[in-house]
């Protein structure tokens, strides 16, 4: 069974492609080894996706 990390102390950062009004943004937290938590900036208390770091790297590379 895999343990989900406690995200209350996460240091979230917004995408550099986000607009100044805060709409349509994703945020990620970098301080979780092996995982990349991802959330919707419009709903910071809502759920977060936990993505494997390697899968996140592949996803980001495919966008470039």
Image: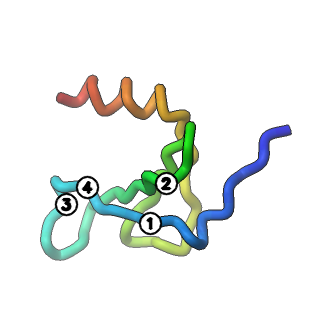
Circle 3 crowding by C-alpha within 10 Å: few under 14, some 14–19, many from 20: some
For mark 1, what is the residue?
A: 11
For mark 4, what is the residue?
A: 15
x then y, percent, for residue 37: 51, 51
Circle 2 crowding by C-alpha within 10 Å: few under 14, some 14–19, many from 20: some
- Residue at 38% x, 71% y: name it: 42
x then y, percent, for residue 17: 16, 54
- Relative to 59, say whether 41 is above or below: below
Q: Quadrant of the C terminus?
A: top left
For mark 2, what is the residue?
A: 31
x then y, percent, for residue 16: 18, 55
Task: Tell me the number on the disc at residue 18.
Answer: 3
- Callout 2 secondary element: loop
Q: Nearer the viewer, mark 2 or mark 4?
A: 2
Separation of marks 1 and 3 at Cα, in angstroms: 17 Å
Separation of marks 3 and 2 at Cα, in angstroms: 21 Å
What is the quadrant of residue 35 in the picture?
top right
Separation of marks 4 and 3 at Cα, in angstroms: 5 Å
């Amino acid at each position: 069974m895999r343990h989900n990390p406690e995200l209350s102390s996460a240091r979230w950062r917004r995408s550099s492609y986000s607009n100044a009004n805060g709409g349509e943004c994703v945020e990620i937290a970098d301080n979780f080894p092996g995982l990349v938590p991802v959330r919707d900036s419009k709903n910071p208390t809502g759920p977060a996706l936990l993505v494997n770091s390697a899968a996140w790297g592949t996803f980001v590379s495919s966008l470039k």
